[in-house]
């Protein structure tokens, strides 16, 4: 697998995101999926996949605690591009057990509680969505935080046993915004109110002009600002 990943990195690193997505879809027919959180980067990729008519299945995770604006964006995105985005939800038994153990907002109590909540609401549904697939496309960018700055465009995700492709890894935030404006890509209005990285409503706040882009996520704790989806 290491040699396959190395070859793919060589083949895809110099390609534009659109060309890279087309190449991956060609190399792994019916085996490429894209997980969108409906963030700005992910909206760029949804646009490229839809406009390129690429055979890449798009899905998202509804944790049950999303902002209304995020759900509205999901509907607007489907309407604009004419593509259905499959929605995965947490298992009801997992949520019932979680809330019984820590309460409805127990994630504020400790990092361990928060990670348990993220696992039930995001990580477990993601594993169901990725099962049996060959390539997982993400909208990660290297400058989002220190962890992501160490990633490659093509990686082997050991946790999910899948090849991960990050076509926007070397894009700047300004490039994302320019693309969205030029192509009239729909985006979450919360971005205009200082919400740069948007997750669950109780776990996301707006940030100031000098704060790290991920500072608005789980602001009450000191952590790497990850939920567990993007770990090797």
Image (tube, helix red, strand yellow):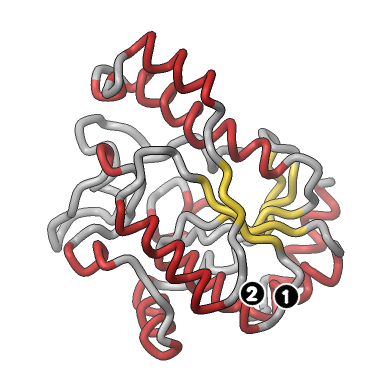
Q: Quadrant of residue 55?
A: bottom right
Q: Residues within 10 Å of mark 2 (few under 14, many from 20)?
A: many
Reply above or below: 100 against 172: above
Q: Which residue is mark 1?
A: 54
Q: Is residue 105 left or right of residue 15?
A: left
Outermost residue to the top: 101
Question: Which residue is at a point 48% across and 70% down the rendered structure image?
Answer: 77
| Disc 1, SS | loop
Quadrant for the C terminus in the image = top right
Reply above or below: 183 against 30: below
Q: Residues within 10 Å of mark 1 (few under 14, many from 20)?
A: some
- Camera-side residue: 185 or 164? 185
> Disc 2, disc 1: CB below 8 Å?
yes
**Label ID, residue 49:** 2
Earlier in the chain: of badge 2 and badge 1, it is: 2
- Camera-side residue: 39 or 23? 39
Q: Quadrant of residue 11?
A: bottom right
Outermost residue to the bottom: 182
Q: Position of residue 184 (x, y in %)?
A: 40, 86
Q: Is residue 91 left or right of residue 217?
A: right
Q: CA distance from mark 2 to mark 1?
A: 5 Å
Q: Quadrant of residue 110?
A: top left
- Camera-side residue: 18 or 1? 18
| Disc 2, SS | helix
Q: Is residue 107 left or right of residue 14?
A: left
């Amino acid at each position: 697998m290491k040699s396959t990943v190395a070859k793919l990195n060589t083949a895809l690193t110099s390609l534009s995101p659109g060309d890279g997505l087309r190449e991956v879809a060609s190399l792994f027919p019916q085996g490429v999926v894209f997980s969108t959180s409906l963030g700005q980067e992910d909206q760029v990729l949804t646009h490229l996949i839809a406009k390129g008519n690429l055979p890449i299945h798009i899905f998202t995770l509804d944790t049950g605690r999303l902002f209304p604006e995020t759900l509205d964006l999901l509907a607007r995105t489907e309407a604009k591009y004419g593509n259905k985005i499959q929605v995965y939800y947490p298992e009801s038994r997992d949520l019932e057990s979680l809330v019984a153990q820590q309460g409805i907002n127990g994630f504020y109590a400790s990092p361990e509680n928060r990670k348990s909540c993220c696992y039930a609401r995001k990580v477990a549904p993601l594993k169901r969505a990725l099962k049996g697939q060959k390539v997982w496309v993400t909208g990660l960018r290297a400058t989002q935080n220190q962890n992501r700055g160490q990633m490659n465009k093509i990686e082997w995700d050991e946790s999910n046993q899948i090849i991960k492709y990050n076509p926007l890894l070397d894009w700047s935030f300004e490039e994302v915004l320019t693309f969205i404006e030029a192509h009239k890509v729909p985006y979450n209005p919360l971005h205009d109110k200082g919400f740069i990285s948007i997750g669950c409503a109780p776990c996301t706040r707006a940030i100031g002009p000098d704060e790290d882009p991920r500072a608005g996520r789980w602001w009450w704790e000191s952590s790497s600002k990850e939920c567990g989806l993007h770990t090797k």
